[in-house]
Amino acid sequence: MNGLQVVFLLAALVSLFSAVMVVSARRMMHAALWLVLTLMGVAVIFVTLQSSFFAVVQILVYVGAIAILIIFSVMLTRRVMEDHGDQILPGWRAAGLVALLLFGVIVGFMTLWLGFSAVLVELPADAENLLELGRSLVSPQGYVLPFELASVLLVAALIGAITIAVDRKEDQDR
Amino acid sequence: MIPLAWYLIFSAALFCIGLFGALARKNAVAILMGVELMLNAVNVNLITFWHYYAQVHNAPYVHGLAFTTMVFVVAAAEVAVGLALIISAYRRRQTPIVDELTLLKG
């Protein structure tokens, strides 16, 4: 077992453990902080896949923006959650069974695939070609249409989020 | 030097933990956290297969990276709108618990 494998196993174990804590923590604020640890572990996984760009994007977008948004909304909606008893629905056993079954089915089908036993080797240094990625995102032969749609989607989400969450006076007495 | 299977099993496990969180939690924000875990598992899978493809064909491969970028963008938009909806519902009903949000019940 070499160093890269040890790094991967450590990051994977930390991420999976903190993911379990995210879904089982009683206090929402603790769950949000465990979520930050999970996202950082996934960023380390991206580094072991030689995708340093997405490791940085993961830190910037998920840890920097999405986790902060989630922590803010935990704080804005916390009045009853601390002392409200169970954080989990009565039918959680069925949910756990569904999740376990799905895991078994996914892993079972993956073992049927011939490439399952492949080993990822180190790519050449120019494998993650960001120049090429940037060009293909704005070239008409590449992904300019999805790229523009993504910008429209982000603007729509921004305006929609403000419209939904704004505190209007006439809604107060409903 | 890492087996491909480790990544696939890791992302399947992360996805199933997120699915359990989305199905079993009471708090709407916790359900959104479960969805975030699932989206992250999908991204790990996409980057794994990007690496695998580049390795098998021995050439830089840009399409997998472009696809992953789109998933990141959609995840960011989804969480912004979802949290706005939760805060709006909380403001009207004073609860973030999905069981008690029964506005649409006939």
Image (tube, helix red, strand yellow):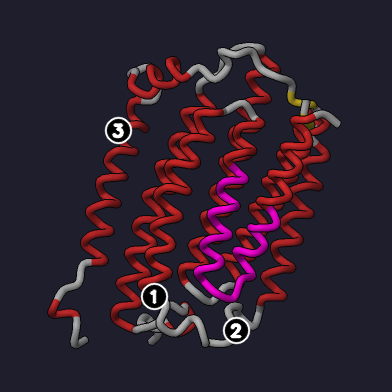
The answer for how far apart the CA atoms under marks 2 and 1 are is: 17 Å
Q: Name the image quarter holding residue B57.
A: top right
The three-letter amino acid code for the residue at tag 1 is: Thr
Identify the subunit bearing mark 3. A
For mark 1, what is the residue? A77
Q: Nearer the viewer, residue A75 or A140?
A: A75
Q: Which mark is residue A148?
A: 3
Inter-mark Cα distance, 1 to 3: 34 Å
Q: Depth-wise, is mark 3 or mark 2 nearer the camera?
A: 2
Q: Position of residue B101 (x, y in %)?
A: 41, 81
Amino acid found under the numbered disc labelled 2: Asp
Q: Secondary structure at mark 3?
A: helix
Say which label, 2 or 1, has the lower sequence index.
1
Q: Which residue shows up at 40% across the image and 82% down it?
A: A79
Disc 2 packing (10 Å; few <14; some 14–19; many ≥20): few
Query: Is A35 on the left-hand or right-hand side of A94?
Result: left
Give left or right: position of B95 versus B26.
left
Residue highlighted by disc 2: A86
Residue drawn at x 71%, y 46% as measured from the top left: A12
Residue at image x 26%, y 49%?
A156
Q: Residue A46 at x, y = what percent?
A: 60, 35
Q: Is residue A42 above or below residue A115?
A: below
Identify the chain of the residue marked 2, using the numbered disc in the image.
A
Q: Amino acid at mark 3?
A: Glu
Q: Which residues are magenta?
A: A16-42
Q: Quadrant of the C terminus of chain A?
A: bottom left
